[in-house]
């Protein structure tokens, strides 16, 4: 393959890993894809001028980094509800919506995790797209964020990062040290990544589905950590603990009784497409539910409610039909 088609093919092989990099930088699946597309267009237009003094991969990362840094100069830092407000007792709960640009977004694994042969490398990739980890990255200044991702996640050498950023190795090492110190102050909670071969995880998720679809609050409570959280972007409300989560689900959340859950994977962790009973029959999209698991129990439930964005992104059906038995 030669000419323009060959140039495109050479660039496209890096799309998934670049999207993962941009997602960690920006915290938005859609902004990450836009950044990578911008990167690809810039690279393709200047491919003939590429002098080969670095690899094509390094060159693309340099362009992608500049695109992300330009985007982050606007000052927006995406967050989770728990980054913005304190937990609210269910008796005082109010649904206050915030703009889309406020929120850290979910992402399908296939968009950001390239296939790699090394199990350790694959594990690091999954760990570092978890919601909690990407949320923690958003606390870092943009250049520190880039340094930490390139050094700690992608395992680049300090000299490579210095060349990419047009700075010195000493500056890179200093930025990395400051980034590590900042993360240590708000260290993301450890949670399990999705593992289809983990029988215990599979049993826990099966029990979760049975409890949620059956709206069995006693069974659901038994699966939750005592300090488990429930959040629902684009609302800034979040709840903590059995009593408030169950109180919400038996109050405002009662509309979810009779729902259906379809398993997916988001951000390296188990997730479900949540379909709500439709008055006209069947089930309609309601939320993308990302599940965080630690020590054999559910530690966090994040229900992303803007289904017009998430269900197409995850290639999910527009509705589910009712089963013959109802």
Image (cartoon, grey):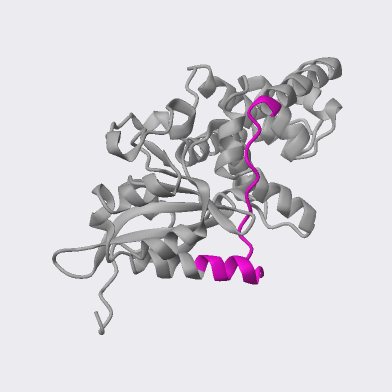
Give the camera-side residue of 94 and 127. 94
Q: Quadrant of the C terminus?
A: bottom left
Q: Is residue 69 left or right of residue 167?
A: left
Q: Give me the residue at 66% from left, 35% from top.
A: 47
| Depth check, front residue: 209 or 280 | 209
In the image, residue 131 lies in the stretch drawn in magenta: no
Say if residue 29 shows up in the picture. yes
Q: Quadrant of residue 240?
A: top left
Q: Position of residue 307 (x, y in %)?
A: 33, 50
Task: From the top left corner, tell me how far across and down residue 91 is, in percent.
Answer: 28, 38
> Which range of residues does the magenta coloring cover?
184-205
Q: Which corner quadrant holds the N terminus? A: bottom right
* Rendered view: 37 above or below 6: above
- Left or right of 17: which side holds 264? left
Q: Please name the residue shown 28% across and 54% down the image.
A: 250
Q: Is residue 238 found left or right of 204 in the rendered image?
A: left
Identified at 77% across, 33% down, the residue is 151
Is residue 201 in the magenta section?
Answer: yes
Locate residue 211, reporting x and y percent.
41, 66
Residue 286 on image: x %, y %: 30, 54
Looking at this view, is 221 or 25 the one in front? 221
């Amino acid at each position: 393959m030669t000419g323009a088609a060959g140039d495109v093919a050479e660039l496209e092989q890096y799309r998934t890993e670049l999207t993962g990099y941009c997602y960690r930088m920006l915290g938005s699946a859609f902004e990450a894809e836009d950044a990578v597309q911008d990167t690809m267009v810039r690279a393709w237009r200047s491919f003939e001028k590429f002098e080969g003094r670095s690899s094509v991969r390094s060159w693309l990362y340099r362009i992608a980094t500049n695109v992300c840094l330009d985007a982050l100069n606007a000052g927006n830092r995406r967050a989770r509800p728990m980054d913005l407000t304190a937990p609210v007792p269910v008796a005082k709960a109010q649904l206050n919506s915030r703009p889309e640009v406020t929120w850290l977004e979910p992402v399908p694994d296939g968009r950001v995790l390239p296939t790699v042969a090394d199990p350790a490398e694959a594990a690091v990739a999954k760990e570092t797209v978890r919601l909690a980890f990407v949320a923690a990255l958003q606390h870092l200044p943009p250049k520190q964020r880039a340094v930490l991702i390139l050094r700690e996640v992608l395992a680049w050498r300090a000299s490579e990062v210095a060349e990419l950023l047009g700075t010195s190795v000493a500056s890179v090492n200093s930025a990395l040290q400051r980034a590590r110190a900042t993360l240590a102050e708000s260290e993301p909670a450890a949670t399990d990544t999705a593992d289809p071969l983990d029988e215990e995880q599979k049993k826990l998720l099966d029990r979760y589905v049975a409890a949620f679809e059956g709206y069995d609050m006693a069974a659901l409570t038994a699966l939750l950590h005592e300090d488990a959280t429930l959040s629902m972007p684009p609302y800034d409300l979040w709840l903590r603990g059995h009593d408030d989560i169950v109180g919400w689900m038996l109050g405002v959340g009662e509309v979810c009784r009779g729902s259906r859950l379809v398993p997916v994977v988001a951000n390296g962790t188990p997730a479900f497409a949540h379909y709500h009973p439709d008055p006209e029959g069947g089930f309609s999209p309601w939320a993308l539910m990302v599940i965080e698991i630690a020590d054999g129990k559910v530690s966090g439930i994040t229900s992303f409610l803007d289904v017009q964005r998430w269900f197409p992104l995850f290639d999910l059906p527009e509705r589910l039909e009712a089963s013959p038995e109802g």
